Image (tube, grey):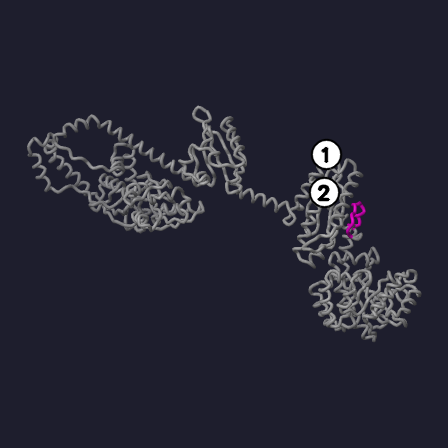
Amino acid sequence: MVLHHEQSTSFPRCQGVAQQAPSRGFFRKAAALLFPFLLLASFFVSSAALGQQRSFTVGVLEDFPKLHMGENGQPSGILGELLTEVAKEEGWVLRAVPCAWQDCLQALQDGRIDLLPDVARNHDRELRYDFHQLPALHSWSQIYGRDDGSIHSVLDLQNKRVAVLAASIQLDYLKSMASSFGIHANLLEVDQFETGFQMVANGQADAVVANYHFGELHAQAYRLVATSVIFQPIQMYYATGKGRHRHLLNAIDKHLAAWQADPGSRYFNILQRWGKPAPSPHLPAWLWWALSALGTLLLGALGIATLLKTQVARQTRHLQASEAKLNTILDSVDAHIYIKDRQLKYRYGNRKVCEFFGLDLPDLIGRSDDQLIQHEGLAETRLSELRVITHGERVAQEEDVTLENGSARTYFSIKIPLRNNKGAIESLCGISTDVTEHKAARLAAHQLAFYDTLTKLPNRRLLLERMEQAIDAIRRGTGFASVLFIDLDHFKRINDSSSHATGDTLLCDAAQRLKNEVCNQSTIARLGGDEFVILLERLGRTQQEAARTAMNIAESVRGALAQPFLIDGQDYLCGASIGVTLIQPDGKSAADVLREADTAMSRSKESGRNQVAFYETRMQTDLQERLTLERELAQAIGTDQFQLYIQAQYDMSHTIVGAELLARWHHPTLGPVSPSRFIPVAEDTGLILRIGDWVLQQACQIIKRLEQAGELYPLSINVSPRQFRQADFVTRVREILQETGAPPERLIFEVTEGILIEDLQGAADRMIELAGIGIRFSIDDFGTGYSNLSYLKRLPLYELKIDKCFVHDTQHGADNAAIVELILAVARKLKLHVVAEGVETQTQADFLIAQRCDAMQGYLFARPAPIAQWLARHPA
């Protein structure tokens, strides 16, 4: 728009007007007389201005009523007219350039336009553009949609198509808000507001975002309504390119400051005109004088009324916006928020409350809980609310509600009194949050932390806590308590031979039997595997009384667990080894007491299982010695401390027909350690695997040495159950035979009947595989274990070894003599070789020779000798 004076051709026309009849009116005549002088003055002013006028390019986008292109090709709307007024004051020439929003911003940054109205400030834009200081216009964003009531809050935008201006602050804010509320809204970017409103009207979108000024003027035309979702109050500015035209912005600030301080300025006139447009009436001439007089009288009142009206309208809009924002917030909160009067009838409820009762807010108002729902906790809820109304208390509590469909929910409610300006309680405000899932998760976490997942019994952590509490009570003089450490016998055998499901069932049944045997005040815990612990409290005032009671309960528990467990129609015998210790006021910790009970249980197992052992101090000493033995045994294997001894086997003519290799340990301080002492330790710790591997390698090397000396009798070595069950045992035997070159038919593996009890079929398969490469097998200590002799036909056996307990009593006991005769008869029938162990007297030897025993081994013929001494007879 070019600011200029009218051409001089209008001068005669003005003269003509001045020469008209007086009936045109006094003011018309006065204007005609003064006009030439005013025109002359304005000419000089205009000439001076034209000497300094500058031209600026203004970007104009369609954002009616804030900004649009006027019919004369110049900026129009609120911001357009304000800029035109500033241009008039400053003598600027404005050239309007229409552009879309993104194009406008890019052109401003590139310098293709000098000034752009209607720009909101943010951090990113302040890096690219310059802004003046005083906002030119205040606005906010609002969502508009069809009149179907589908959008009440931000949460209702879930899966909705929302049209929003591209590259706008509204777009960035909506993305952030959708992310914060965890909702998915399909944001459709448009180049101008009209496009978005048209898309909603045509069904291509569900809602559109616009500023308040545009939306209020255009929503009705597109048959859209304003929703209650209002956000992002913003201030609108004029912007220039970074580092360009700062004087333009300074001039704008100067005029805005002056106009905004004057309620009757052109600034407020423009806002009023574009806020509520109204046609100007054309008055007849005869009413001019009357209206002029009335205007003079009412001018002051009109200015005041206009100012008050503007302020009231502004405050009304602010209140409406605040109320809408508050409703949006309250409806978006995932909690029941409500207000009740003194009769406990609803005066307000947010969206969650209305959804809970299935009512709209108008239908909820004036009704009480007992009119809407029935549940068991209703009376308790009413009492707590009366405490708030009557006594002004703040109530915070959990409330359980059972719905009509039978589902139970738990709410955590906080209720506070609301007072009027005189301090009297007139209502209550409540916030109830559904904590059902949270409470279930908390309970599940507690169960995982403190209870065994299989048996639902307390775990080690909870047991130790309760033991510490019991210890504290005992120190205060409440008497004695006791701990029972229970380990199920043969559980691993049942678990491995049947199935883990069977094992789990047995553990659960055992836990139930423990519950049946002790009182509810006791703590029954599962430590893991097949280990249980019972904490017995308040057993008596004296140590003797407490110990007697604890032992009686332990025997009762042992008896209960010794009974068969019926699982899937099959009986399983298990039994239990139980260790008992007392908790005394002697300063021991829970871990110390538990260790004592465990030690006593271990002694019970060593004594033959299925027994009850009471903890004694010397047990701890034995345990320490055992731990020391374990450590030193691990260090001894493979050193000179560990040696092989050999004991020959003789036939009836006193000829060597075989020999057995025996491991011996010579401790540097303890001296010779009996195999009966270190072999069980090796079995329990797994060291037996190292010992067995070492013995096998040594045996193969010894066979080669004896072979070179011409001694071709076989060597027997003991194979432990743990070594035999190793998955790679057969592979390892093959490797050692290949490394040493020893003939496998010269090796005899002595195994116990215990291997057959654990897994007969598995043992048979492994023995058959080893027999296939030439290894022969002998059953050691035959007659002392497995009562079912049918395995003799199923296994690839070469030899039976009669246990020395039968051999020793042949000369005095007819029964043992009969057993030996029976074994020899069975062996001959099955064509098995027989070796009798522990032959120490000539009488025993004569008896065996008379019964045609194949071989004899014992002190009568030869004691075990170091292998080095034996081989020295035949130097390599």
- Residue toward you, 325 or 377: 377
Name the residue tied to disc 2: 518
Which quadrant of the rendered structure holds the C terminus?
Answer: bottom right
**Residue type (three-letter) at the residue carrying disc 2:** Val
Residue beneath the point at 83% across and 76% down? 710
**Residue type (three-letter) at the residue carrying disc 1:** Arg
- Residue toward you, 728 or 484: 484
Residue 617 belongs to magenta span = yes
Note whether 276 is above or below 774 in the view shown: above
Q: Crowding near pointer 1: few (<14 within 10 Å), some, many (20+)? A: few
Taking 296 as reference, is 811 left or right?
right
Q: How many marks?
A: 2
Taking 149 as reference, is 668 left or right?
right
Q: Quadrant of residue 278?
A: top left
1 vs 2, front mark: 2
Question: Considering the numbered disc 1 on the image, is that residue within a helix, a strand or a loop?
Answer: loop
Taking 617 as reference, is 393 left or right?
left
Q: Give the spatial CA distance, label 1 vs label 2.
A: 25 Å
Residue 44 belongs to magenta span = no
Residue range of the region highlighted in magenta in the rendering: 609-624
| Label located before the other in sequence (1 or 2) | 1
The location of residue 550, given as percent across then percent down, is 76, 42
Q: Crowding near pointer 2: few (<14 within 10 Å), some, many (20+)? A: some
The location of residue 647, given as percent across then percent down, is 85, 66
Taking 308 as reference, is 526 left or right?
right
Name the residue tied to disc 1: 476
Kindly identify which numbered label has been placed on residue 566. none
Note whether 634 is above or below 402 in the view shown: below
Q: Is residue 108 visible?
A: no
Note whether 265 is above or below 167 in the view shown: above
